[in-house]
Amino acid sequence: MNAREVIIRPIITEKTMAQGSEENKITFEVAKGANKTLVAQAVKEIYNITPEKVNIVNVHPKTKRMGRYVGKTNAVRKAVVKLPEGQEISLFGEE
């Protein structure tokens, strides 16, 4: 699996941005078959940073209603990557 296929996109929410500034953690959406080792190798290859720790979470789909129609949200696999002190990943392209 290619590194760009393992890490799909960063997840940017209020909670993940607070974790990024306080605990030096970044959250990514990853491929369904990705494990901790693959995610760590992909972060090292893409950003040239060796992560200290990787946690993986499966987010199950939730039932949502729109009037009388019922549907489900997509199931997502997330990886929370802890970076070493002094290292950071710029998600917004800031210099």
Image: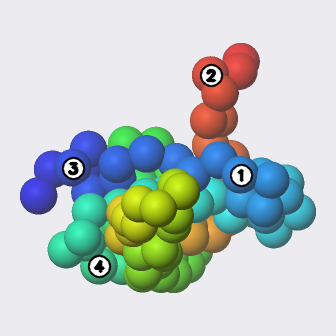
Its colouring scheme is rainbow
Q: Are marks 2 and 4 in contact (CB under 8 Å)?
A: no
The answer to whether 56 appears left or right of 7 in the picture is right
Cα–Cα gap, marks 3 and 4: 13 Å
Cα–Cα gap, marks 4 and 1: 23 Å
Report the disc number at residue 35.
Answer: 4
The answer to whether 6 appears left or right of 12 in the picture is left
Label 1 sits on a secondary structure element that is: loop
Image x and y of residue 20, in percent? 76, 56
In depth, the one of 1 and 29 nearer the eye is 29
Disc count in the image? 4
Three-letter amino acid code at the position of disc 3 = Glu
Mark 3, residues whose alpha carbon is within 10 Å: few (<14), some, or many (≥20)? few
Three-letter amino acid code at the position of disc 1 = Thr
Q: Earlier in the sequence, mark 3 or mark 2?
A: 3
Three-letter amino acid code at the position of disc 2 = Gly
Cα–Cα gap, marks 3 and 1: 22 Å
Image x and y of residue 75, in percent? 36, 70
Report the disc number at residue 5.
Answer: 3
Residue position for label 1: 13
Q: Is residue 41 placed above or below 48 in the rendered structure?
A: below
Which quarter shows the C terminus? top right
Q: Is residue 78 placed above or below 57 in the rendered structure?
A: above
Residue at the image position 80 percent from the left and 53 percent from the top:
14
Q: Are marks 3 and 1 in contact (CB under 8 Å)?
A: no
Q: Earlier in the sequence, mark 4 or mark 1?
A: 1
Q: Single out the mark in the foreground, 3 or 1.
A: 1
Label 2 sits on a secondary structure element that is: loop
Residue at the image position 65 percent from the left and 27 percent from the top:
92
